[in-house]
Image (spheres, grey):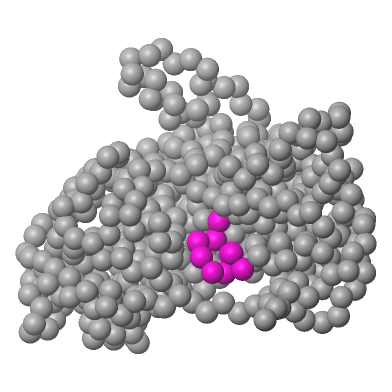
C-alpha cells in the first residue's frame, strides 16, 4: 500500500514560489514576528513577510537577531525565528545559535544558500561559502538544505515538530537562493498536535520508593523545569510540594532560576556552583534531578561526583547516561513525571505553598529539618542535620554589590523579567544575591557562555511580553559586544532599563590572571561615556553613584518611553 505523501496530505496543491511557501508555513505555525536583516539574497522572503503582515524586527547585527529571538522564545514559549542572508549573515548569527543550543532555546534560523546548480568548488558567487549548512549544523541540532520548492513546507514543519516533541534546540533551514522566486506545486504542512511524553509507570514507582526511604533527599531543577509563558512554573510548584512532603532542599541551575519561589525556606536558589551547596548535594542519599545536565558549567567543578542514588527526569534520553548516570531514568515530559510522583507519594497539589510561613511541620524557617517532615508512618523522615552552610560563602560572594542588588529589588516589580549578561555583576551578584519568585524570570547565557546577550535578548523579551517589565544587566565589557542594539531598542520605543556595571574591562579574566600570578594583560579597556553614548542613539543615559540613586533611576526608567542606560560603579 502506498504511504500518504506528508507534503500533499491535505488541501490542494498550488503553484507558489519558494519564498511564499516558506512564509505561509511560518504563519500557519503561528509566527507573527521574525528577527533579521534583509540582504541581496533574501529579498523574496522579506517581500512575502511584508505581504503576510509579519512583524520584521531589524537588529543592527545578526548576532543580535539571534539573541533577540532567544529572549523572545524564553519568555513566550513560542519559537523565535531568525532570517538572515547567505554567507556572512548566517555566520554572524552563529554565536547566538550556539548559545541557544547550550540553553535549549527553540530558534529557527532560515537563510538562503548558494543556488541549486552552484559548483562544489565555487565560482566567486556573492556571499559564497564552501558548505554553509554544514558549518552552522555543527552549532545547532540540525541543518537541512532543501532541494526543491515542494520540500520547503515539510522542512519548516519538521522544525516546529522538533521544538514540540523533544529538547527544543535551534535548527537551520537553508533554501537555495534560486528556489525563492521559483514556482512549484506545494501544499502547506499545517501544525500537528503533539502529546506530551508520558512517564514509564514502573520507573515512577521505583523513584517514589527511593524518595520514601530517603534520609537526606535533595532536588536539582534545571531549565527543563521551566514553562515559559506560564504564570507559575507547574514543575517548580510540584517540586516544592514534594520538597515540603520530605523536607528536601531544592537548588536550581542558572536556567532553572525562577522555577521555584526563592523565598521558600527549602529553596537554595541558583547556588549550585557554591562549594557548600556542592558538598551538600554530594552528601544527599537520593537526588532528584529535573531537566538538567548537572554539567560543569552549572557546578563550576569538573569532575563532580554524587554519592547517593540519582533519579533523573528529562525529555532528552541522552541525559540518562551522561556524566551522572541515572539510577532511575524517567524519560518524559517533566510536568507529567512530577505529577506521577506526587500521586504515588500522596502529595496534595492544591492550596498554596507553605513558603510564606515562618515555621512549618518538619522544616524550620532556617531550613533545618526537625525529623518530622516525612509526614507518614511508613516514611522515616529526613535526618536531623545542620543547614547547608552556604550563607557565609554567599554573603562574601555578593558583598560588593549587596546595596545595588537590594536597590534593584526595591525598584523592580515582582513580575520583572531580568536579562543578564556574562558579567561579574550578574553571575557573582544578581544570580545568587537577588532572589526571585515566580512568575519572575531570569534569562542568562549559560554553558556556551557568550558575551553581549543581555541587551538584544531583553529587546526580544520585551517584544514577546510587552505586558511585563524587563530589565537588562551587564558589565561594561559585555555591553560593548552588542551596544549597537540600542538603536534597535530606540527605534522600537521600548521602555527598557539597561544597568551597566563599570569595572574597566573584563574583570573576571583580570582576577583569574592575578590568581595565576600573572600581570593583567589585554583586559583593561577604555570605556566610552555610556550616558552620552545612549543620548547619541536617542536613548536616555544616567550615571549614578549610590544604591539610592540606582533605585530611583531604575524606577524612572521603567516608566520612560525609550530605553535608559544606567552606568553604575562596580560595588556599592
Quadrant for residue 74, please give it.
Answer: bottom right
Bounds of the magenta segment: 161-169
- Could you say which is closer to the camera, residue 480 or residue 148? 148
| Percent coordinates x, y for residue 178 in the rendering | 89, 49
Q: Is residue 165 found inside the magenta-colored segment of the image?
A: yes
In the figure, is residue 194 to the left or right of 189? left
322 vs 530: above or below: below
Considering depth in this image, is 365 or 352 the residue closer to the camera?
352
Q: Nearer the viewer, residue 533 or 476?
A: 476
The answer, for residue 353, to whether it is visible in the render is no
Single out the residue that lies furthest toward the top.
Answer: 519
In percent of width and height, residue 173 lies at 71, 54
Q: Is residue 380 above or below residue 445?
A: below
Residue 356 included in the magenta stretch of the image:
no
Quarter of the picture holding the C terminus: top left
Left or right relative to 303: residue 443: right
Q: Quadrant of residue 158?
A: bottom right
Amino acid at each position: 500500500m502506498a504511504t500518504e505523501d506528508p507534503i500533499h496530505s491535505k488541501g490542494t496543491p498550488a503553484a507558489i514560489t519558494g519564498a511564499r511557501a516558506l512564509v505561509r508555513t511560518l504563519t500557519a505555525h503561528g509566527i507573527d514576528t521574525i528577527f533579521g536583516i534583509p540582504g541581496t539574497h533574501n529579498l523574496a522572503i522579506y517581500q512575502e513577510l511584508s505581504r503576510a503582515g509579519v512583524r520584521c524586527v531589524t537588529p543592527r547585527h545578526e548576532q543580535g537577531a539571534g539573541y533577540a529571538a532567544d529572549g523572545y522564545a524564553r519568555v513566550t514559549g513560542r519559537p523565535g525565528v531568525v532570517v538572515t542572508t547567505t554567507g556572512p549573515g548566517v555566520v554572524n548569527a552563529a554565536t547566538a545559535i550556539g548559545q541557544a543550543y547550550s540553553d535549549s532555546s527553540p530558534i529557527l534560523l532560515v537563510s538562503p544558500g548558494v543556488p541549486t546548480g552552484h559548483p562544489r568548488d565555487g565560482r566567486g558567487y556573492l556571499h559564497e561559502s564552501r558548505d554553509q549548512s554544514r558549518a552552522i549544523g555543527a552549532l545547532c541540532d540540525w541543518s537541512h538544505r532543501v532541494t526543491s520548492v515542494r520540500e520547503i513546507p515539510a522542512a519548516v514543519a519538521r522544525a516546529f515538530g522538533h521544538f514540540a516533541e523533544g529538547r527544543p534546540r535551534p535548527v537551520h533551514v537553508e533554501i537555495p537562493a534560486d528556489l525563492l522566486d521559483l514556482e512549484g506545486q506545494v501544499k502547506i504542512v499545517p501544525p500537528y498536535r503533539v502529546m506530551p511524553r508520558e512517564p514509564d509507570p514502573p520507573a515512577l514507582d521505583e523513584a517514589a520508593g527511593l524518595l520514601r526511604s530517603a534520609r537526606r533527599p535533595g532536588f536539582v531543577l534545571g531549565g527543563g523545569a521551566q514553562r515559559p509563558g506560564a504564570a507559575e512554573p507547574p514543575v517548580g510548584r510540584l517540586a516544592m510540594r514534594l520538597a515540603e512532603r520530605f523536607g528536601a532542599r531544592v537548588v536550581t541551575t542558572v536556567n532553572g532560576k525562577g522555577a521555584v519561589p526563592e523565598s521558600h525556606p527549602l529553596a537554595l536558589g541558583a547556588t549550585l556552583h557554591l562549594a557548600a551547596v556542592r558538598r551538600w548535594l554530594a552528601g544527599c542519599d537520593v537526588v532528584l534531578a529535573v531537566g538538567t545536565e548537572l554539567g560543569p558549567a552549572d557546578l563550576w567543578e569538573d569532575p563532580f561526583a554524587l554519592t547517593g542514588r540519582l533519579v533523573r527526569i528529562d525529555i532528552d534520553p541522552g541525559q540518562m547516561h551522561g556524566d551522572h548516570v541515572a539510577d532511575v531514568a524517567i524519560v518524559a515530559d517533566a510536568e507529567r513525571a512530577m505529577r506521577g510522583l506526587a500521586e504515588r507519594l500522596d502529595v496534595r497539589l492544591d492550596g498554596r505553598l507553605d513558603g510564606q510561613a515562618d515555621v512549618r511541620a518538619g522544616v524550620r524557617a532556617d531550613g533545618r529539618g526537625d525529623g518530622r517532615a516525612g509526614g507518614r508512618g511508613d516514611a522515616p523522615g529526613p535526618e536531623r542535620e545542620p543547614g547547608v552552610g552556604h550563607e557565609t560563602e554567599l554573603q562574601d560572594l555578593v558583598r560588593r554589590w549587596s546595596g545595588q542588588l537590594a536597590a534593584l529589588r526595591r525598584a523592580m516589580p515582582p513580575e520583572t523579567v531580568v536579562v543578564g549578561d556574562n558579567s561579574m555583576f550578574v553571575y557573582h551578584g544578581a544570580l545568587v544575591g537577588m532572589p526571585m519568585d515566580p512568575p519572575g524570570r531570569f534569562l542568562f547565557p549559560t554553558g556556551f557562555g557568550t558575551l553581549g546577550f543581555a541587551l538584544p535578548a531583553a529587546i526580544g523579551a520585551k517584544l514577546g511580553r510587552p505586558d511585563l517589565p524587563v530589565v537588562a544587566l551587564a558589565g561594561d565589557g559585555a555591553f560593548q559586544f552588542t551596544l549597537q542594539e540600542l538603536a534597535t531598542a530606540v527605534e522600537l520605543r521600548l521602555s527598557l532599563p539597561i544597568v551597566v556595571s563599570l569595572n574597566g574591562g573584563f574583570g573576571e579574566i583580570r582576577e583569574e590572571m592575578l590568581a595565576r600570578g600573572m600581570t593583567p594583560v589585554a583586559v583593561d579597556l577604555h570605556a566610552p561615556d555610556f550616558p552620552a553614548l545612549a543620548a547619541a542613539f536617542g536613548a536616555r543615559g544616567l550615571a549614578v553613584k549610590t544604591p539610592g540613586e540606582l533605585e530611583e533611576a531604575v524606577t524612572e526608567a521603567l516608566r520612560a518611553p525609550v530605553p535608559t542606560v544606567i552606568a553604575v560603579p562596580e560595588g556599592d
